[in-house]
Image (cartoon, rainbow, N blue to C red):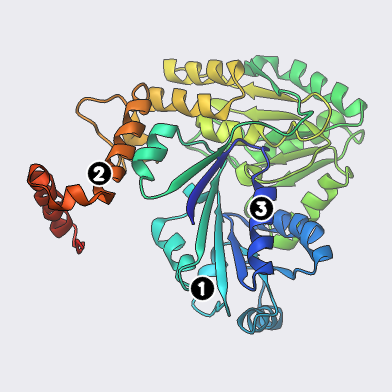
Amino acid sequence: MNRLLQGDVGSGKTIVAAICMYAVIKAGYQAALMVPTEILAEQHVHSLKGILEPLGVTVELLSGSVKGKKRAEKLKALENGELQLLVGTHALIQDDVLFKNLGLVITDEQHRFGVEQRRVLRDKGENPDVLFMTATPIPRTLAISVFGDMDVSIIDEMPAGRKTIETYWAKPDMLERVLDFIEKELQQGRQAYVICPLIEESEKLDVQNAIDVHMILKQHYKDQWGVGLMHGRLHPSEKEQVMDAFSKNETQILVSTTVVEVGVNVPNATVMVIYDAERFGLAQLHQLRGRVGRGQAQSYCILLADPKSEVGKERMRIMTETNDGFVLSERDLELRGPGDFFGSKQSGLPDFKIADVVHDYRALEVARQDAVALIQSSDFWTKEEYEGLRKYIEYQGVLNGQKID
């Protein structure tokens, strides 16, 4: 298997991954799950232990903060096969991490890792099955053209009973009303996230930072509500304490940077407020919005923004109009163009002379299927009519240093 699984935020990719890993482990192999942040890794370990340990599967965490004797014990258990499922960050691709029999490699939020990092993990097994997962939807077009060597599966619906998250765009001068709205939700026993683009004040950027906002909210709500602070500079044990307090509803408001962007699961949280929302891309805003709406109660996302550019205003409008990640990614592609899809104009992305990657995806998909069928047929390799195309492929292969069989 070499497959990309796309599914919107909260659609159930983790449970699909758990089932895959359980099947592989039952067949006598080990599985590895690599994720981009320590918070997400800890969340995954917690949920996977709950699902798989009662079924006799050993699940452990490996991250930068696992050191010394504890780390050595885990690596030994991994190498002798006692440890069946290892969840971790980039720590999984260190040279001394050795598996006895790695059969399945899963990379969550795969776009957050480099090609080389993904390859190193794959090479720790002998040709293991590979599953990439992403909640930052890649339009079908790019899935076909960029991941042409990969099968693509899509989870296109949400678990039953989920309510659509209501999204509003508010100007900064409406902050008082937003804080009153948060208060109403907290009075009903709910919780709220408040996201800021920076950890602390910057001379160069006139944007809200988490430390200041944390102080403002503590003063505003007095001692009525607990306000937590989360950011990337906290020690792992401090992060764990902050998340634990929020998960148990000991703190009702969590002020954070985007470290909570992926995977964090607190079903009781119903409000997501994002300061300076125009500074975030559509995919990131959608990820952040996905931290709420995980329980039965109605959830809300409030974008505090005063964008100056038309593109910024359009982003805010799109966010309030749709909750569909696939629609969002198509609109994002229209706004940014294909060249910027993975950030700074990466090479290898389709720059078609005729086709429009947004509107012509069906034709592109059919063209790819035809190309695969043609190359797999004996006619292509023997008939004279395909000689020019064969030579072109061989020439391209030589250019790229590939051996053409």
Q: Quadrant of the C terminus?
A: bottom left
Q: Residue at x 59, y 25 (%)?
A: 324
Q: Amino acid at mark 3?
A: Leu
The x, y position of residue 392, in whole percent, is 11, 48
Q: Residues within 10 Å of mark 2 (few under 14, many from 20)?
A: some
The residue labelled by disc 3 is: 40
Mark with earlier residue (2, 1)? 1
The residue labelled by disc 2 is: 374
Q: Amino acid at mark 2?
A: Leu
Q: Residue at x 37, y 50 (%)?
A: 149
Q: Nearer the viewer, mark 2 or mark 1?
A: 2
Q: Tell me the number on the disc at residue 94.
A: 1
Identify whether 303 is placed above or below 208.
above
Q: Element under label 1?
A: loop
Location of residue 176 (image quadrant)? top right
> In this view of the protein, can residue 389 be seen by the observer?
yes
Q: Residue at x 65, y 80 (%)?
A: 81
Q: Amino acid at mark 1?
A: Gln
Q: Nearer the viewer, mark 2 or mark 3?
A: 2
Q: Residues within 10 Å of mark 1 (few under 14, many from 20)?
A: few
